[in-house]
Amino acid sequence: MVRVALLSNPKSTGNRQTLPRVRSYCANHPDIFHYEVEHVDQIGRALQTIARVDPVVIVINGGDGTVQAALTELYQGQHFQGGAPPIAVLPNGKTNLIALDLGIHGDPIKALERIVEIAKAGVEDHVVARELIALSDGRAERPVLGMFLGGAGLADYMLYCRNRIYPLGLSNGLSHFLTALAVLASLLLGIRGRYMPPSARPVSISLIREGQLVGRFAVLIVTTLEKLLLGARPGDGARGHMKLVAVDQSAPALLRLLWASLSGRVGKARMQGVHFEQGDMIRIEGDRSSVILDGELFEATEGHPIVLKSTQPVPFLRLAA
């Protein structure tokens, strides 16, 4: 009986080193069905095949783009009668936010071993519900689904890290540290230049029934994960399942957020220039304002806003009961 179906993308950065170990582990465990894809376009057919073996858990082993494409296909593809089984994500990509939210971190093989143990013993106590973010930009035939969106200045910083820092061949941790230093130098000291992160573009953020934010934001985060960056926690679920954090592009606002983060008080009190909101529908409008949903870039243009909606809950597997 197949307990775990593992969907791997050999071309993801993390798998270049770990996939041989993953293959060896799966070869010695017949209760794991391992399917490899080399491009996200193959994920739909992969999940059709995985549905036939009826696994207890589906594990995604790939970068951010693989995870996003798999979540989109799982939610919209209707491959599983009665709904898809719980989903787990191995720590593999550059950020691993979804894996961390589910308590999955460290060595991917050890995480896979733990997932197999849970699948054999019974997953009921480990299943948690998470809503997804459905993104529509008026161009794609169907919405793209994910769980973490970075926009405004944050998207520009993520692109800066991807295009300027990652090519240096440094570790993820050092790359993120250097990016943070460049961002702080830009925002706090006003340093500008060809090799520095760009300034954020003006953007309008509309939360249906909750009002509108307009301005230049150094940070814009929308997520359905239980934990936000910098230690912020979700608030009242009755206001909506998508949590939003927006920080004005100003040194005082950023310093307030950093101080609140260090003192563990993010989201516990109002801070000037720092906005915490929740909603089930969010519109992002601007002239060439970028957002990144789980690693994939989208751009809002005049007359083509980005619209975010929360989906119905999807089952995920959390390692800690």
Image (cartoon, helix red, strand yellow):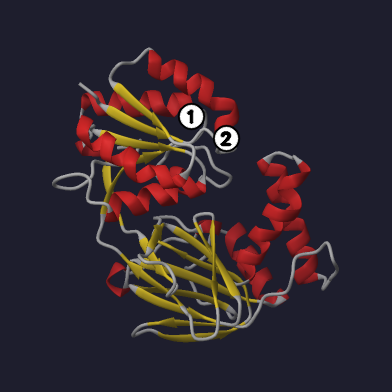
Q: At numbered mark 2, what does the secondary structure look like: helix, strand or loop?
A: loop
* Residue bearing the label numbered 2: 14
**208 versus 113 height, above or below:** below
Q: Is residue 82 left or right of residue 252?
A: left
Numbered mark located on residue 108 in the image: 1
Count neighbours of disc 1 (C-alpha within 10 A) and say few if under 14, some if 14 to 19, many if 20 or more. Answer: many
**Residue closest to the eye, 24 or 128:** 24
* Quarter of the image with the C terminus in it: top left
Residue name at image x 56 percent, y 47 percent: 95
Residue name at image x 30 percent, y 49 percent: 74
Q: Amino acid at mark 2?
A: Gly
Count neighbours of disc 2 (C-alpha within 10 A) and say few if under 14, some if 14 to 19, many if 20 or more. Answer: some
Residue name at image x 67 percent, y 43 percent: 173
**Residue closest to the eye, 1 or 40:** 40
**Residue closest to the eye, 211 or 48:** 48
* Quarter of the image with the N terminus in it: top left
- Residue with the most extreme top position: 28
Residue name at image x 86 percent, y 68 percent: 193
Mark toward the start of the polypeptide (1 vs 2)? 2
Numbered mark located on residue 37 in the image: none
Foreground mark, 1 or 2, reads 2
How far across and down, in percent of the image, does residue 161 sit? 70, 54
**22 versus 240 height, above or below:** above
Badges 1 and 2: C-beta atoms under 8 Å apart? Answer: yes
